[in-house]
Image: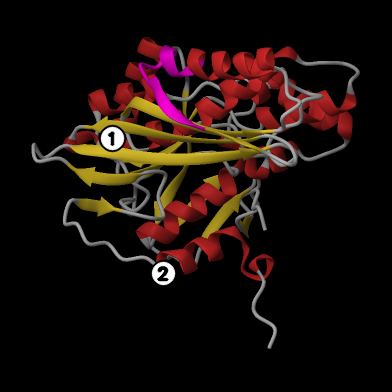
């Protein structure tokens, strides 16, 4: 009898199946599979964070578009972003790398230098890992351990009705940068940097936690539409997103216009922006915005509100028309 194929249920459906196959034996495990990082309680009452990500050549990166240093940077940044999404700070990383035997030693060194640069920038030491032969392209797997104080811990599941939905920085830039690289013609430096050298919002997460307790938070790795749906599903709430309030850089707008594509689609489904999407009490917004912008230079935008109907996750256009917001972001299967 034919069994169900992975592509029939998708990446997130597969994750739910995997959750049903594993058991948690330790009381110290506060949060396991399903968020940006696992949460392990210390005896002191604070928490260790553990996350991992895998980047596969041809799926996540192509060497024709990026140097090995940039590939290393991005691989490290993706993992550090998960720690930021939990409100924490990274401590240690281990790297497992598979590559073909004909790869040059200096290329491997450049790859590690890129990873080390982004990790060291945010206080994270690479302390080990493994290397193996690949019969195809490169595969980079990184695991990061971080730490977060109890009062700063953020997960996807705490959003409250009436919360403001906020985002750091701007959205759609990574998608715009990739499209610019593919064209190999007119280039847009800002968008290309957003794609090749994303900056994890570690400092922004700390600044947010300095002045307010966020109710839910996630990093935008798969696109805004997917991440809003993740928070609402885990928090059992709905959401209303205002399209006109979504921050988009002018380079992103120009690239989308030139290609005849919707800039809103870039923001909703582009992915790999690695900004923070979070919810908090609306009366805390001004203090958070002021503190974050003063200490990091990164703007904070309010793009929506949490509602009580978990079946109604909608986007509102400039005329007030509502349309259901489906998770349009990237899935592997």
Compared with 52, 320 (above or below) is below
Instruction: Please give the name of the residue rendered at 37% of the width and 11% of the height, measured from the top-left corner.
Output: 294
Pointers 1 and 2 in contact (CB under 8 A)? no
Residue 23 location (% of width, % of height): 31, 66
Instruction: Please give the name of the residue rendered at 66% of the width and 53% of the height, measured from the top-left corner.
Output: 332
Instruction: Please give the name of the residue rendered at 43% of the width and 47% of the height, measured from the top-left corner.
Output: 305
Count numbered badges in the picture.
2
Residue 124 location (% of width, % of height): 37, 20
Query: How many other residues sit within 10 Å of disc 2, few (<14), some (14-19) or many (≥20)?
Result: few
Which residue is label 2 attached to? Answer: 21
Image position of 205 (left or right of 73): left
Instruction: Please give the name of the residue rendered at 43% of the width and 12% of the height, measured from the top-left corner.
Output: 121
> Where's the N terminus, which quadrant?
bottom right
Q: Quadrant of residue 324?
A: bottom right
Image position of 21 (left or right of 138): left
Q: Which one is in front in this view, the residue at disc 1 or the one at disc 2?
A: 2
Helix or strand or loop: what does disc 2 sit on?
Answer: loop
Query: What segment carries the magenta color?
Result: 118-130
Residue 182 location (% of width, % of height): 85, 28
Can residue 167 be seen here?
A: no
Query: How many other residues sit within 10 Å of disc 1, few (<14), some (14-19) or many (≥20)?
Result: few
Viewer-nearest residue: 21 or 102: 102
Q: Is residue 96 magenta?
A: no
Which residue is label 1 attached to? Answer: 283
> Where's the C terminus, which quadrant?
bottom right
Viewer-nearest residue: 107 or 30: 107
Viewer-nearest residue: 103 or 262: 103
Helix or strand or loop: what does disc 1 sit on?
Answer: helix
Mark sitting earlier along the chain (1/2): 2
Image position of 5 (left or right of 50): right
Compared with 123, 134 (above or below) is below
- How far apart marks 1 and 2 lie (CA) works out to 42 Å
């Amino acid at each position: 009898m034919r069994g169900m194929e992975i592509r029939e249920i998708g990446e997130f459906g597969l994750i739910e199946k995997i959750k049903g196959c594993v058991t948690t034996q330790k009381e110290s495990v506060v949060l396991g599979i399903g968020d940006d990082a696992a949460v392990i309680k210390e005896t002191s009452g604070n928490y260790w964070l553990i996350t991992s990500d895998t980047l596969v050549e041809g799926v996540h990166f192509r060497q024709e578009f990026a140097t090995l240093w940039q590939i290393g940077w991005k691989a490290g940044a993706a993992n550090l972003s998960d720690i930021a999404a939990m409100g924490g700070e990274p401590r240690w990383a281990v790297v497992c790398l598979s590559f073909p035997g004909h790869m040059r030693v200096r290329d491997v060194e450049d790859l590690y230098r890129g990873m080390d640069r982004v990790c060291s920038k945010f206080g994270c030491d690479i302390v080990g890992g493994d290397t193996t032969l690949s019969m195809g392209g490169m595969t980079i797997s990184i695991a990061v351990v971080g730490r977060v104080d109890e009062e700063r811990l953020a997960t996807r599941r705490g959003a409250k009705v009436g919360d403001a939905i906020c985002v750091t920085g701007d959205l759609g830039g990574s998608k715009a940068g990739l499209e610019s690289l593919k064209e190999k013609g007119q280039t847009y430096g800002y968008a290309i940097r957003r794609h090749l050298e994303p900056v994890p919002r570690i400092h922004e997460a700390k600044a947010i936690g300095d002045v307010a307790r966020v109710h839910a938070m996630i990093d935008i790795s798969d696109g805004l539409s997917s991440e809003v749906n993740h928070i609402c599903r885990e928090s059992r709430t709905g959401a209303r997103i205002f399209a006109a309030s979504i921050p988009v850089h002018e380079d992103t707008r120009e690239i989308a216009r030139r290609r005849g594509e919707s800039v809103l689609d870039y923001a909703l489904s582009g992915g790999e922006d690695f900004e923070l999407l979070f919810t908090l009490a609306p009366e805390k917004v001004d203090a958070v915005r002021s503190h974050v912008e003063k200490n990091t230079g990164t703007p904070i935008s309010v793009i929506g509100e949490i509602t009580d109907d978990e079946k109604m996750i909608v986007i509102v256009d400039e005329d007030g028309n509502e349309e259901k917001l489906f998770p349009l972001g990237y899935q592997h299967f």
